[in-house]
Structure formats: structure tokens, C-alpha cells
Image (tube, rainbow, N blue to C red):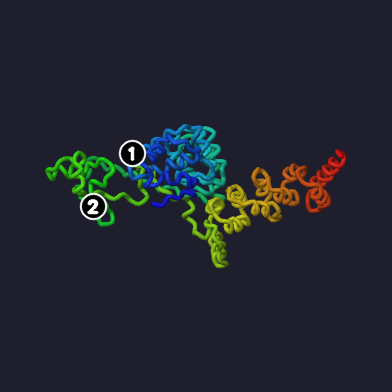
Amino acid sequence: MKIPFDRLGIPVEYRSKLSPEAPARGRLAIAKGMLPLPPDVQVSAIYVLMGHKERSIRSAAAQTLQELDSEVTLRAISPRTHPKVLEYLTEHRTEDQDFLERVYALPNANDRTACMIATAARGDLVNVICRNQSRLLMTPHVYLSLKENPQTTAAQLERVHSFLRMQNSLPDEPTPTPTPVSAPAARTPAAPKKVNKPVSAATAPKLKRVKVSELTEMSVEAEVMAALLDLPSPFSNPHIAKRLEILIAEKPEGSEGVEDPSFTFSFQDDAEQFSSSMVTDDDLAPEEKLGIAQQIATMTTGSKIKLAFLGNAEARKLLLRDKNKQVAVAVVKSGRLSESEAGAIAANKNLHGDVLREVAINKEFLRSYKVKIGLVNNPKCPVSVAVGLVPLLQRSDLAALARNKNVPSVVRRTAKRTVQQRLNKK
């Protein structure tokens, strides 16, 4: 299984330590959390080792992630954390409401994680979940999880139900299993005889032949095979282990590593539901750009929001024009915008004011003078935002803003007053 180091946020200098060729002692030290690493790198590296072929390493990694200090875990997670890492951490921290709230606010949390949190939420967190409309659209099944949660009130459920119904995103209710009607005692039929159905080829477990010497953990099957052949234990006699072969069941694809029936270890994330032309940053041909537009046109609002957080520049450009402002706001919140994209959005007079407000509250974007000048000259920019940015402009731009009839009068007056104040200081 190929490890997506870039997606996991593991720097180049640490990758060799996680390879199968690396010294086992070093891998075990990372698995046990003994190597000093930045919290985000540590969590991702330990997750990688949960899929290691050696049981001692993957068991140590799983135990370390489960027992990791809450403060360290909170510092480790961010919108860049791999969705499967968030999923595993959430599964073993369902009692930590602060952690659950933090994860639920992350757009990179996958659907299973969101539903787990909705089921385990208590107190104020239930209300937070009910108010997060973007997540409800991305993962409508959160509604069904809230219904299973005894902490959810009828009023909260009704509010979520009404919102999803209005957005045509209400998930189908599971079909209840009908309760059989008991027949009169005198007419109770005899219990049917159990029939052992033959196992079909499709459902039969796949077996593979392996040498016992290749096994990395104690195997009951190997001990049984040796006993049947009247041979010594293969684990006390290397010669026997080398020549003894057994049949073992193959694990299904994606089930490597963690021996947890409720969690599937993998590196797959939600980006795989979209075509590569939507999520890769390669140069696109005109027909590919047209294909992206056609695919987006058929998507639900929730899928568009999900793509806003995962898509490439071409997908973001199309999603910004969506009639639903929540989709355009998600593009700004994605954390994937370049400085030039943010500047273009700030100056775009066709976008909703909420989109411009989201740009204005991002400190990274406001470091760009192009973003500041674009916002104050944009008539769609909320007045409170524009007025706050006026003092940050250069004198020539202030003079031009004071004459700009397209912006609200209060913005023009603030620009004039700022110019006058600067002149009086001289």
C-alpha cells in the first residue's frame, strides 16, 4: 500500500524512518511516541505504523494513539490532518467533548467521523452540530445519528429535519424490521430444521499458502499443523518453521494493520469520490475544464461543499459562482486558496458579502495589500469590514477611494477623514 506522505503532512526527513527497510528499533520508538516530533507529524507517523506488518509495532502504535495526551492531540489536528487519522482518534475519544467539537468543525473530517460525533455528543455540542449547516449538507446522515442520540431534543431534531428537507437533502430513514405476530399457543408450528447452506465461491474466504518462517507473530494454525504432523513446535525449532507451510485466510483489501472490526485502516479519503481532474493541480485541457463544469452542475449542494475543500483551482473558480452562498464560503474556508486567488475574490463584485467577509477575517489573506485594496473598493464588501481596512491603505489609494462613487458613502467619508488626519500630523 502506497503511503501518501504529502497528504499525511510527513516531511521528507522523517519518511525514511517509516519505511520497511528502516531499523526496527527506530520504528518501534516512533510507534511508542518516544521520538521527539512535532505533534502533527507524530500523530501521522504513528498512524502509518498502525499498518505495519509486525504486530509489535502496529500494536504499540495503536496503543500510543489511543493514550496520547489530550493537549498534544488537540495541537496535532488541523484542516490538514488526514481524514482517516481523525476518524481513528475520534473512535477512541468519544468521551472527550472538547476534542469532538474541534474535530466536527474541521472540514476534512469524513462522514463516518461526523456521524460518530453526532451519536456521542452531549450538552452544548449537540446544539453546535445542529447549527453547522455546511456539515449537515456535506453529511446529511448526521441527522440519523442525532436521532439515535438521547441527548438530542425534539426541537433540535425538527430544526435539522426542516433545514435538510428545504435543501432536498433529507436522508432516507432506515426501514424498520417488522415485528412478527405471535400465533396462538395451540397452533405454534414446529421449529424449522436448520439447513446448512453450502458456502458459495463468492462468500468463501480466500486462502493463501505461506511458510511459517514468514509469519511475524505466533500463529495457532502453525502450532496445530505441527501437532497434526507430529512435529515439534515451529516457534521453538527454526528448522521446522522453515519447511512447514500452512494455509491462512487472506485479509480483505484495506484491512491491514489495526485489528479493530469497527475501524478500517487505510489511506483513502473523501477526495477519491471526485475525478482526478477536479482534485489534481495539473494543467487541464479545455475539454477537461468543460467536463468539470458539467460534473459540478449535477452535484448536490453537500457534494459541492465537500469539493470546495478538496478541489483544485479550476473547481474552486467554478464553485465560487454557485448560487448557494454556502458553497462559495466553503471555497474561502478551504485553506487551499493562493494569494492571487484571494485577491481576485476580494475584487469580485459578483460575490455575496458573506464570501468577502470570510476573506476579510483571514489574517493570512489580509497580509496581501492586493486583498485589502480589493475589499475596500468592492461595493459588495460589508461596510463594517471596509471601514476597518481604510486606515491600512496608502495615501494615493485613500484619495482614490474618497472619490469612488461605487462604494458606500460612509467608506468614502472615512477615507477623506483618514487623509486629513495624516495631513494634520505633518
Type of amino acid at the residue the image marks with label 2? Arg
Q: Which residue is mark 2?
A: 209
Residue 35 lies in quadrant: top left
Determine whether, in the image, residue 226 is placed left or right of residue 17. left
Residue 141 visible somewhere in the drawing: no
Upstream in the sequence, badge 2 or badge 1?
Answer: 1
Q: Which residue is mark 1?
A: 56
Locate residue 263, reporting x and y percent.
Answer: 39, 43
Type of amino acid at the residue the image marks with label 1? Ser
Element type where label 1 sits in the image = helix
Q: Nearer the viewer, residue 37 or 132?
A: 37
Residue drawn at x 53%, y 40% is 129
Locate residue 289, reporting x and y percent.
Answer: 57, 64
The image quadrant where one finds the C terminus is top right
Residue drawn at x 53%, y 61% is 295
Residue drawn at x 86%, y 42% is 423
Neighbours of disc 2 within 10 Å: few (<14), some (14-19), many (20+): few
Determine whether, in the image, residue 113 is placed left or right of residue 223. right
Determine whether, in the image, residue 387 is placed left or right of residue 108. right
Neighbours of disc 1 within 10 Å: few (<14), some (14-19), many (20+): some
Q: Nearer the viewer, residue 213 or 60?
A: 213
Spot the residue most to the bottom. 287
Residue 259 lies in quadrant: top left
Locate residue 343, reporting x and y percent.
Answer: 68, 52
